Amino acid sequence: MASRLLWASRAASYLRISVSHRGFASVVKDLKYAESHEWVKVDGKTATVGITDHAQDHLGDVVYVELPEVGATVSQGSGFGAVESVKATSDVYSPVSGDVVEVNEELNSSPGLVNSSPYEKGWIMKVEIKDDSELKNLKNSDEYAKFCEEEDAKH
């Protein structure tokens, strides 16, 4: 169903018809977003990180996810892995600085979870946050949705 909605949306966009994406939530409230299309869910000092629905949609079917090592230190805005799809390979950037405390090993055997469940089962890593103030550099859901609309309008 989502693919039909996506096709209809693209057709409507081409024809300059306004459509609403009912039933296809591409942005989740209460998450923070980087302009490089990663999301963060903060729970205390732990941040769960993944790529957004917008990013996975543009990538297409994900066939491989390069995970960071547990114990690795990541920095906000720096690459920590990659997502490979049938269309392209894209670097993934950390939206927060800290130490990797867990990675989603399930992505080794089921990388498509990034497509089917980007905000739940398709998460990539969990990081112990070093500096909470970095979260101010990220967008809220409304800001990110607007950013995506503007970015898509350019293409």
Image (cartoon, helix red, strand yellow):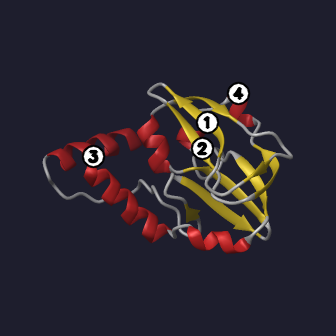
Q: Give the spatial CA distance, label 1 vs label 2.
A: 5 Å
| SS under mark 4 | helix
Label 4: how many residues lie within 10 Å, few (<14), some (14-19) or many (20+)? few
Label 2: how many residues lie within 10 Å, few (<14), some (14-19) or many (20+)? many
Is residue 128 found left or right of 125 in the rendered image? right
Q: Residue at x 64, y 70 (%)?
A: 135
Q: Are marks 2 and 4 in contact (CB under 8 Å)?
A: no
Is residue 45 found left or right of 94 in the rendered image? right
Report which residue position mark 4 lands on.
109
Report which residue position mark 2 lands on.
92
Q: Give the spatial CA distance, label 3 vs label 4.
A: 33 Å
Q: Residue at x 47, y 29 (%)?
A: 88
Picture quadrant where residue 57 is located: top left
Report which residue position mark 3 lands on.
155
Q: Nearer the viewer, mark 4 or mark 1?
A: 1
What residue type is disc 4 on?
Answer: Ser
Percent coordinates x, y for residue 49 in the rendering:
66, 53
What residue type is disc 1 on?
Answer: Ala
Task: Tell which of 82 and 9 is nearer to you.
Answer: 82
Q: Give the spatial CA distance, label 4 vs label 1.
A: 16 Å
Task: Tell which of 21 and 37 is nearer to you.
Answer: 37
Looking at the image, tell me whether mark 3 or mark 1 is earlier in sequence order. Answer: 1
Q: Residue at x 60, y 74 (%)?
A: 136
Q: Are marks 3 and 1 in contact (CB under 8 Å)?
A: no
Report which residue position mark 1 lands on.
82
User: Can you say which quadrant of the picture contains the N terminus?
Assistant: top left
